[in-house]
């Protein structure tokens, strides 16, 4: 019996001082684990919500960027067309100016060539007609120039 009494005393002491604190410690750990799992679930739910919101924000940003890109490209095309028209107008004006300059130079060269041809023709005629009578020894130049070397006016019909 004394062994039974000792056993009961040890059982009561162990239950009160060892078993109950260990059970309490295990229950506290279980509560902390449950709370941690609950918080992890909440964090996962928040992460999923934030991920969905992030996707929405990215989609709106891409849409906005596409619209702006389209507007910028359209503006660029418009500016390009304006620049091309302006360049065409400027080149057309420059071509017209160059054409006028070329015509002026052409007329100037025609005048010079005509003068040279007439001068050579006049020289040849003078050489051929100089010894002939009727020109007073002055040749054909007497028909066109007076005694002072000035050009005679020619009658117009």
Image (cartoon, grey):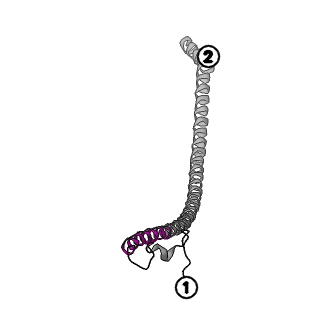
Q: Which mark is residue 156?
A: 1
- Answer yes or no: do the residues labelled 1 and 2 have beta carbons within 8 Å? no
The residue nearer to you, when weighing 45 against 92, is: 92
Residue 69 coordinates in the image, percent (x, y): 56, 57
Residue 133 coordinates in the image, percent (x, y): 40, 78
Membership of 102 in magenta stretch: no
Q: Which residue is mark 2?
A: 13
Relative to 108, say whether 28 is above or below.
above
Mark positioned earlier in the residue sequence (1 or 2): 2
Residue 115 coordinates in the image, percent (x, y): 46, 69
Relative to 28, say whether 55 is above or below.
below
Q: Quadrant of the N terminus?
A: top right
Disc 2: CA contacts within 10 A as few (<14), some (14-19) or many (>=20):
few
Disc 1: CA contacts within 10 A as few (<14), some (14-19) or many (>=20):
few
Look at discs 1 and 2 and give the one toward the viewer: 1
Q: Residue furthest bottom?
A: 157
- Residue that appears at 58% across and 46% down: 45
Chief SS of the magenta region = helix
Give the magenta-colored segment's residue range.
106-133
Judge from the rendering whether residue 22 lies leftward or rightward of residue 122; answer left or right: right
Relative to 5, say whether 66 is above or below.
below
The residue nearer to you, when weighing 104 against 82, is: 104
Q: Quadrant of residue 121?
A: bottom left
Q: Quadrant of residue 27?
A: top right
Q: Secondary structure at mark 1?
A: loop
Q: CA distance from mark 1 to mark 2?
A: 157 Å
The residue nearer to you, when weighing 89 against 127, is: 127
């Amino acid at each position: 019996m004394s062994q039974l009494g000792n056993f009961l005393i040890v059982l009561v002491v162990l239950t009160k001082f060892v078993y109950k604190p260990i059970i309490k410690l295990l229950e506290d750990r279980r509560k902390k684990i449950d709370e941690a799992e609950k918080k992890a679930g909440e964090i996962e739910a928040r992460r999923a919500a934030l991920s969905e919101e992030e996707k929405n924000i990215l989609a709106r940003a891409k849409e906005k960027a596409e619209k702006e890109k389209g507007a910028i490209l359209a503006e660029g095309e418009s500016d390009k067309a304006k620049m091309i028209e302006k360049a065409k107008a400027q080149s057309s004006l420059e071509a017209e100016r160059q054409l006028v300059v070329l015509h002026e130079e052409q007329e100037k060269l025609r005048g010079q060539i005509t003068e040279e041809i007439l001068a050579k023709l006049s020289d040849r005629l003078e050489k051929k007609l100089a010894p002939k009578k009727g020109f007073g020894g002055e040749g054909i130049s007497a028909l066109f120039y007076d005694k002072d070397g000035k050009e005679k006016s020619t009658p117009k019909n």
